Amino acid sequence: MNLSEIAEALNLSARTCKSAMDREVGGGYASDLLSDVMGRARKGDVWVTMQTHQNVVAVAVLKEMAAIIIVNGREPESDTAQKAEEEGIPLLVSAEPTFEVVGKLYSMGIRASSDA
Amino acid sequence: MLRPLRFDLHLHTVLSPCGEIEMSPSAVAAAARKAGLSCFAVTDHNASANVPAYGEAASREGVAVIPGIEITSREEVHVLGYFDDYSVLAGLQKTVYASLPGRNDPDAFGIQAVVDANEDVIEMDEHLLIGATSLSVEEVVDLIRAGGGLAAASHVDREGFSITGQLGFVPPGLGLHALEISPRTTPSSVHARFPETSGFPLLCSSDAHRLSEIGTGWTEILAFEPTAAEVLLALRGEGGRRILRLSNG
């Protein structure tokens, strides 16, 4: 499954890297603690979080994640969006809370990566 | 003699992965003098090895340096610790390193340079300084207090990495001496958002990551000397010492 299929099904808006929406998503992880994500997220995951500061981009780059979904109608800070654009990390925003977003991803077949 | 002294107690050097490379010892010291600071604190993320170099450079400019550190708790709360005796901080540093998993990836997070006062790089710190320690916020505060240091919660008006943002409130009984606020807010705004903050003295600091931010937030304190011990006495209002004003009111 790729990002644009997910974005359409979940009514997400892309804020960065709109040309990378054909990227494949291998799994998912949801957490707001960066240290937890650094330890447990896997390459190709889509990451669901409410954090909007620019450190999320650095973590996504480090873990080679497919994209970040920012929940609760929050918008990435301007330096976060700028860094995400530079680093090639799609930032998608959802008006819904984490629970709803993760439930919909799960129902579409997205799972936590097997070695997580 | 008691005199008004201007402190900026939160500043990142080239040791912090997020600190700009322009934050060299001499450049920081010169910027602090131009900003009219009596004193600044060196507070790198989970690290303190650049305190001696910046202290030496600052003394050339007639500016005092308080040795400090900004520790990340396992809840990802940032807590500032200030010490007058660098050897005490260096001892505490061993506990912080032992509690800090992972290795830095400079491409993802930035370089972490330990430098001398002449701006030569001594070594690259390989710890994951941007990461979180395994210490709880209570353990971090207790660690700072056990070393005789001053413990302050970082930028409580901000959501990211603040005690208010990560925990939602300031837990009663936590042994913080003060709360730090950013230049962008005001004490009355912080008190309105988080009523429990009224029970703590406030300090305003810049949290500078680049030269232009140094001294954009400050706390003016009536004290004898620009030291952590004097700040602590001023927070308690002892011997005529007191907080005079914050840059943001």
Image: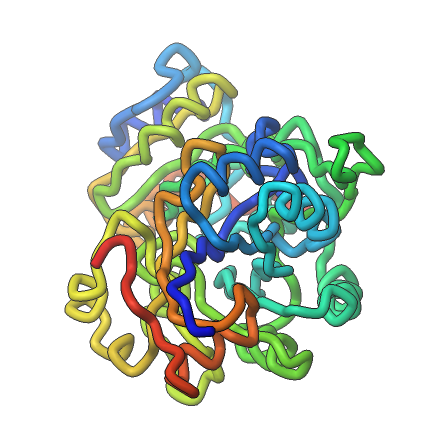
Which residue shows up at 46% across the image and 83% down it? B174
Give the side of residue A10 with respect to residue B217, left or right.
Answer: left
Residue B211 vertical position relative to residue B97 in the rendered view, above or below: above
Residue A14 vertical position relative to residue B97 in the rendered view, above or below: above
The quadrant of the image that shows the C terminus of chain B is: bottom left
**Which quadrant would residue B98 be assigned to in this image?**
bottom right
Give the side of residue A64 with respect to residue B161, left or right.
Answer: right
Residue A69 vertical position relative to residue B219 in the rendered view, above or below: above
Q: Residue B145 at x, y = what percent? A: 60, 81
Q: Residue B73 at x, y = what percent? A: 57, 65
Give the side of residue B100 with respect to residue A91, left or right.
Answer: right
> Which residue is at the front of the view, B237 or B103?
B237
Which residue shows up at 75% across the image and 71% down it? B88
> Which residue is at the front of the view, B145 or B58?
B58
Does the rendering let one see residue B92?
yes
Q: Residue B9 at x, y = what percent? A: 48, 57
**Which quadrant would residue A43 be assigned to in this image?**
top right
